[in-house]
Image (cartoon, rainbow, N blue to C red):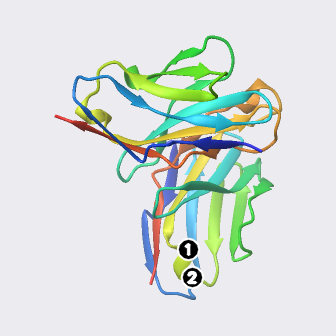
């Protein structure tokens, strides 16, 4: 079985401050981990993924995420938030040993305050 | 050019009606998907087709019938619409997933089709 948890429905941060959007996962084998972003009335857009290798993954728009196997986490981070980063963020996981498709988290609404 | 396009963008209809949503991708991808996003933004896969063949059907009622005339198109037909079918339906595509690392392919999503059943 595979599952992913985003413990925060809403994250607020001031513009210019660092931001973190949390994600933890559960898989039987090795995880493939993804972050997607959804702007209002739009489809999801891919930000970054972890498959193997370096635990720190860099993605689009200055975002990065760190894979932590011991804590089964894949938190999304950005050193300095922009108002335009305000959107809905989804973490997703796929068990590398499973034929199942991606399982998405429940989403975290990020609001960057000017 | 839009990579994954869905029509219509908005659909308002009465209970009991039958409706279709069309999806086309021009990325040359082999695999296409339908996802349902409910009012709480929860996203769940419904179907996946690989080169016109159904590979995933995630316990979706028989009222939902996907059709893939070719690998660039995946349409969703819904019979006897119910209030609970109201949602945003997203089409997506990817290159063919596999058992190895190539299975971790990135999905490209359409902009969504908002269905409202009255």
Residue under the image location 57 percent in, 42 percent down: A5
Residue B85 shows which numbered tag? 1
Q: Quadrant of the C terminus of chain B?
A: bottom left
Residue under the image location 62 percent in, 85 percent down: B80
Is residue A70 shown above or below B61?
A: above
Residue extending furthest top?
A: A54
Q: Secondary structure at mark 1?
A: helix
User: Depth check: B22 or A36 in front?
Assistant: A36
Circles 1 and 2, Cβ within 8 Å, touching? The answer is: yes
Image spot of residue B23 (x, y percent): 57, 56
Whether residue B56 can be seen here: yes
Residue B82 shows which numbered tag? 2
User: Depth check: B13 or A28 in front?
Assistant: A28
Residue extending furthest left?
A: A114
Image spot of residue A100 (x, y percent): 77, 45
Q: Quadrant of the N terminus of chain B?
A: top left
Chain letter for mark 1: B
Q: Secondary structure at mark 2?
A: loop
Q: Say yes or no: labels 1 and 2 on the same chain.
A: yes
């Amino acid at each position: 079985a595979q599952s992913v948890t985003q413990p925060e429905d809403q994250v607020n941060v001031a513009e210019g401050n660092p931001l973190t959007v949390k994600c933890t996962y559960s898989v039987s084998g090795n995880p493939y981990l993804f972050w997607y972003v959804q702007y209002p009335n739009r489809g999801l857009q891919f930000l970054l993924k972890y498959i193997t290798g370096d635990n720190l993954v860099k993605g689009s728009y200055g975002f990065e995420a760190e894979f932590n196997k011991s804590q089964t986490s894949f938190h999304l981070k950005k050193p300095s938030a922009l108002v335009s980063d305000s959107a809905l963020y989804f973490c997703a996981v796929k068990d590398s040993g499973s034929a199942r498709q991606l399982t998405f988290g429940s989403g975290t609404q990020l609001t960057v305050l000017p | 050019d839009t990579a994954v396009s869905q029509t219509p963008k908005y659909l308002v209809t009465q209970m009991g009606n039958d409706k279709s949503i069309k999806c086309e991708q021009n990325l040359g991808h082999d695999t296409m998907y339908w996802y349902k996003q409910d009012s709480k933004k929860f996203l769940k896969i419904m179907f996946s087709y690989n080169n016109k063949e159904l590979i995933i059907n995630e316990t979706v009622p028989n009222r939902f019938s996907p059709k893939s005339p070719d690998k660039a198109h995946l349409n969703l037909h819904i019979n006897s619409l119910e209030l609970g079918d109201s949602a945003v339906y997203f089409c997506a595509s990817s290159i063919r997933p596999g058992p190895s690392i190539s299975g971790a392919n990135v999905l490209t999503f359409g902009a969504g089709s908002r269905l409202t059943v009255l």
